[in-house]
Image (cartoon, rainbow, N blue to C red):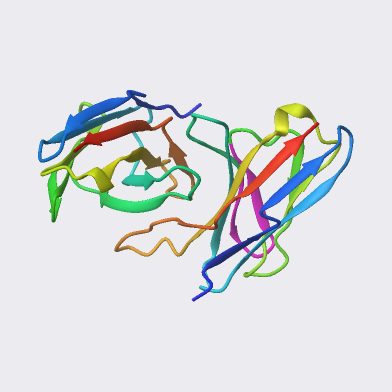
Amino acid sequence: NAGVTQTPKFRILKIGQSMTLQCTQDMNHNYMYWYRQDPGMGLKLIYYSVGAGITDKGEVPNGYNVSRSTTEDFPLRLELAAPSQTSVYFCASSSHDQNTGELFFGEGSRLTVL
Amino acid sequence: QKEVEQNSGPLSVPEGAIASLNCTYSDRGSQSFFWYRQYSGKSPELIMFIYSNGDKEDGRFTAQLNKASQYVSLLIRDSQPSDSATYLCAVTGWTGNQFYFGTGTSLTVIP
């Protein structure tokens, strides 16, 4: 069972470069999320989507963009990378099932901006 | 700004003891409440969820919710060294679409 798959797992960027973090889920979940986690901190919501074609900002959207063209994919784009974007990024999905509504997480992508 | 607050710890308990983890939230419209466990270098995994006021028990874990006080807690009975991890409290906003996390409480169970 693949669940939520993120790529790449590790990446080093130079200041000003751009990149896309890929996220795919095979559970047919409508809801998808991008979080960042800084060392010793909790998860901060960057962007989320409630279905294909619909995205919305979370707590810390500046410097990021997303798209949701299909139910399965929810890529996160970093434009003009800055050292402040050094973090671990987690993609998650949810069915918002009435029983649990839990978030299923990918394994994370560790990004360093130098 | 939705706020979810937890004591960062670290919290240390001896093996076999009860560990008590606490969380408060600012949004009175929050609907659902979750406890996630995160081992170092790993992604969070769901431990418990609770929607209604009161207690909910699942094995060694008990979640307690008090919406009037905007407070949710997690009790871990008979703590084991394998319970050593960071515990994240998460709540959903009033729409139910967004999940907001606390900073987490680091728990160490001493053998």
Report the magenta stretch's main SS: strand
Where is A54 relative to B78, above or below? Answer: below
Where is A50 relative to A78, above or below? Answer: below
Does the stretch in magenta take in A48? Answer: yes
**Farthest-out residue, bottom:** A1
Quadrant, the C terminus of chain B:
top left
Where is A73 relative to B98, above or below? Answer: below
Does the stretch in magenta take in B42? Answer: no
Total marks placed:
0
Tell me which segment is drawn in magenta: A47-58
Image coordinates of residue B94 in percent, x first then y, are 41, 42
Image coordinates of residue B7 in percent, x first then y, are 32, 23
Q: Name the one closer to the observer, B63 or B82.
A: B82
Residue at point 41%, 32% (across, down): B102
Q: Name the one closer to the observer, B23 or A55.
A: B23
Residue at point 32%, 60% (across, down): A100
A26 displayed left or right of A15? left
Residue at point 51%, 73% (across, down): A27
**Farthest-out residue, front:** B111
B96 displayed left or right of A83? left
Q: Name the one closer to the observer, A11 or B15.
A: B15
* The quarter of the displayed image where residue A52 is located: bottom right
Residue at point 11%, 43% (across, down): B77
B26 displayed left or right of B77? right
Image coordinates of residue B65 in percent, x first then y, are 19, 38
**Farthest-out residue, right:** A16
